[in-house]
Amino acid sequence: MKLISIDSTDTIVALSSSPGMSAVALIRISGPEAISIVEQCFSGKKLSQTPSHQAVFGRLVSNDQVLDEVLVTTFRAPRSFTGEDVVEIGCHGSTFIIEEVLKLLVGLGARLAEPGEFTMRGFRNRKFDLLKAEAIADLIHAESALAHAAAMNMLKGGLSDNLKTIRTSLIDFASLVELELDFSEEDVEFASRDALAKQVQNTLAFLAPILETYQYGNAIKKGIPVVIAGKPNAGKSTLLNRLLQEEKAIVSSIPGTTRDVIEDTIHIEGIQFRFIDTAGLRESGDVVEQIGISRARERIKTAHLVLYLFDASAFTTQSWQEELIEIEALGNQILLVGNKMDEAPTSTLQLIEETLVSRPFKLISAQKNTYVDELKKQLLKQSGIENINPNNIILTNLRHYESLKKVEVQLKKVLESLHQHISTDLLAEDLRLCIYHFGEVTGEITNEDILGNIFSKFCIGK
């Protein structure tokens, strides 16, 4: 992404609503000339005399021709999303009208915005920090209730406020330690080492549970990956189709029908799950099937949970020992699913329950849709997601996690330095690095390449 200078005087414009035909479209323009540019083509109440945050009705005129009837809202600096003068134009959602309005505004002096440039300007103008800026992007892309809740909590600023408070406290300590360096010959101590150690310990205790949430937070954001594995003809594709409620995968009585990974998502009680149907696990001389099996094993390694299907109707103690070798080799969190229970005699079902009594398992019939809803509930329980409180801070962003891990590592170094009674100059350097990493998290210390990467992932009108 092309990064715009902090003191840029450009006025930018973009479509902020979804592209394509719609009943209403929203076009946003931001910058020092935003109001005057729109005023040149707006027939209605004079926008320069309109109070901030007030919508007025009028017409957009191009070459003495009425282009559209619109609703225009002005937001005066600094009380706007970007911290600049902003005008939002609500027009009809014809693709022709949208293109003509954008062309008109560009012709009057605006330029088309880069991806994420509106949000970047808000960040540059200190309307919000980098954590909140990224929370805006997460909110836009939230595909489940829990992902939405996680983004909203980050946007509210709970983590930002706590990190800024901690950073300010460390800066105070660092200032006193630096002061000691100026009086090194007097051998005085302005910063209480005990108080600093307590502060560091409290901060580590605060960060630890937050860092632990990333394991689930990343899954919440992208959807919890669940691999459906098992031997050929166990009913994996039938189960996938039943979960998705559509014929996504080819179902056949011929073993080895599934040759590649098939994937789709559903929501269970507001949480998105990504179900992945894989090739049956077996030894095969078929080159294409071997590739499918290899891909299946790769997906199993990265799965949050594995649904291991076995044919309940053909269950025996010997067949279970053979399945067990495959299961234990998977090395992942596994939920055993006995399929085709409708074809199994009562004695076989009893044998399954006696054999698997110490393991999490579920008996179903994917074909008859028997106990599939109960399987979904078991999935929710075993994923561990239902134990997460959506009102707490949940890390869903890899940058946040990696930055906070750097903070944690540096805090531990500070604590170790205090225990070893190292020299004041070395302690001062440890504190400087700690404060630096805190600043990286919130954006108080920024790297232009990192900013470009973050904001380039936003949509054009945001």
Image (cartoon, rainbow, N blue to C red):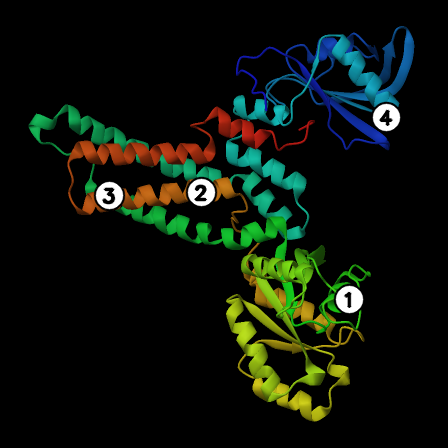
The percent position of residue 217, horizontal first and vertical second, equals 55, 51
| First in sequence: mark 3 vs mark 2 | 3
Q: Determine crowd level at label 4: few under 14, some 14-19, many 20+ residues with C-alpha closer than 10 A.
A: some
Q: What residue sits right under mark 1 in the picture?
A: 242
What is the C-alpha distance between the residues marked 4 and 3?
Answer: 63 Å
Q: Amino acid at mark 3?
A: Ala
Give SS at disc 4. Answer: helix
What is the C-alpha distance between the residues marked 4 and 2?
Answer: 42 Å
What is the C-alpha distance between the residues marked 1 and 3?
Answer: 59 Å
| First in sequence: mark 1 vs mark 2 | 1
**Residue 262 visible in the current orientation:** yes
Q: Determine crowd level at label 2: few under 14, some 14-19, many 20+ residues with C-alpha closer than 10 A.
A: few
Residue at point 81%, 76% (across, down): 368
Foreground mark, 4 or 3, reads 4
Q: Is residue 128 above or below residue 240?
A: above
| Quadrant hosting residue 180 | top left
Q: Is residue 420 left or right of residue 384?
A: left
Q: What residue sits right under mark 2 in the picture?
A: 402
Q: What residue sits right under mark 4 in the picture?
A: 95
Give SS at disc 1. Answer: helix
Q: Is residue 12 left or right of residue 386?
A: right
In what quadrant of the picture does the N terminus appear?
top right
Q: Amino acid at mark 2?
A: Glu
Q: Is residue 193 above or below residue 51?
A: below
Residue at point 51%, 73% (across, down): 328
| First in sequence: mark 1 vs mark 3 | 3
The answer to whether the residues at label 4 and label 3 have Cβ atoms under 8 Å apart is no
| First in sequence: mark 4 vs mark 3 | 4
Give SS at disc 2. Answer: helix
The answer to whether the residues at label 1 and label 3 have Cβ atoms under 8 Å apart is no
What is the C-alpha distance between the residues marked 4 and 1?
Answer: 39 Å
Q: Amino acid at mark 4?
A: Thr
